[in-house]
Amino acid sequence: MTLRDAYFAYAVGAVWVAAAVLYLAGARGWRSERAERAGGTLLLGNGVVRWTYWMTAPVVRTLVDLEVSANMLTWASLVLGLGAGVALALGEPGLACLLATCSTIGDILDGEVARHTHTGSPRGELLDAAVDRYTELAFVAGFILWVRASLPLVVLGLAALQACTLVSYATAKAEALGVPPPRGLMRRHERSAYMILAVGLASMTDTLAPAIAGFAIVAVIGNVAAVQRFTRIARALG
């Protein structure tokens, strides 16, 4: 890690802090249908979810005016997400934090643009779901390659990878079986928030400790949440 790399993480932090100040100053009562549908949990509260959608709302309007399609944003999210994984693998967590943040915001924007322009489709949802898996797995793979010299940390990365995969798979399996997908902890946006914040702090502090803590939270809570989801699905199937 280098001081230059930390600048990327500081830039991301500065934007989020500025947005938080503006939100708290006069937009706390703001509501969004998609934000309310996404909801919050113990790990990521309703206020944070609303704040994120509030921050992206002006960007959505601009993109709609510029006739940027939802699919264009989805593909951009894929490129940025893969780039984040590569940056992390090369030991540049600050740059990875910036690219992953942009990729995650792109994942929010594509759905909002599709909703505003009435261009949503099953094919678009399939593309979005596939890109989500690729970008998330690339990020965790980047972490594993970053810490490859330490077997315990590689195992931690694999456990986080398993959590990401199984939580998403449980939801998809429930839908395939005609069962309402069970809600729980460590959904996609929660996993992204914790892992991106973790590597950003690692860059700022020039130590692996925050990254280890963030990925450990995802690994432990995510795997427990996956088991709970499968158990609820089994009960729903009778």
Image: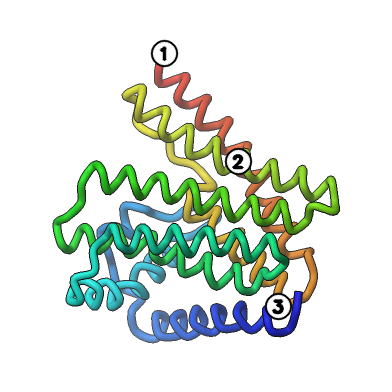
Crowd rating for badge 3 (residues with CA inside 10 Å; few <14, some 14–19, many 20+): many
Q: Earlier in the sequence, mark 1 or mark 3?
A: 3
* Residue bearing mark 1: 238
Total marks shown come to: 3
Residue at image location 34% in from the left, 84% down from the top = 26
Q: Secondary structure at mark 1?
A: loop
Closer to the camera: disc 1 or disc 3?
3
* Residue bearing mark 3: 204
Q: In which quarter of the view is residue 74 placed?
A: bottom left
Q: Earlier in the sequence, mark 2 or mark 3?
A: 2
Measured from the top left, where is residue 12 in percent x and y?
Answer: 54, 78
Measured from the top left, where is residue 2 in percent x and y?
Answer: 75, 79
The quarter of the image holding the N terminus is: bottom right
In the rendered view, how is the structure colored?
rainbow
* Residue bearing mark 2: 163
Measured from the top left, where is residue 198 in percent x and y?
Answer: 66, 64
Q: Secondary structure at mark 3?
A: helix
Residue at image location 24% in from the left, 42% down from the top = 122
Separation of marks 2 and 3 at Cα, in angstroms? 26 Å
Label 1 near label 2: C-beta < 8 Å?
A: no
Q: Which amino acid, by three-letter code, is at mark 1?
A: Gly
Closer to the camera: disc 2 or disc 1?
2
Crowd rating for badge 2 (residues with CA inside 10 Å; few <14, some 14–19, many 20+): many
Separation of marks 2 and 1 at Cα, in angstroms? 25 Å
Residue at image location 52% in from the left, 24% down from the top = 231
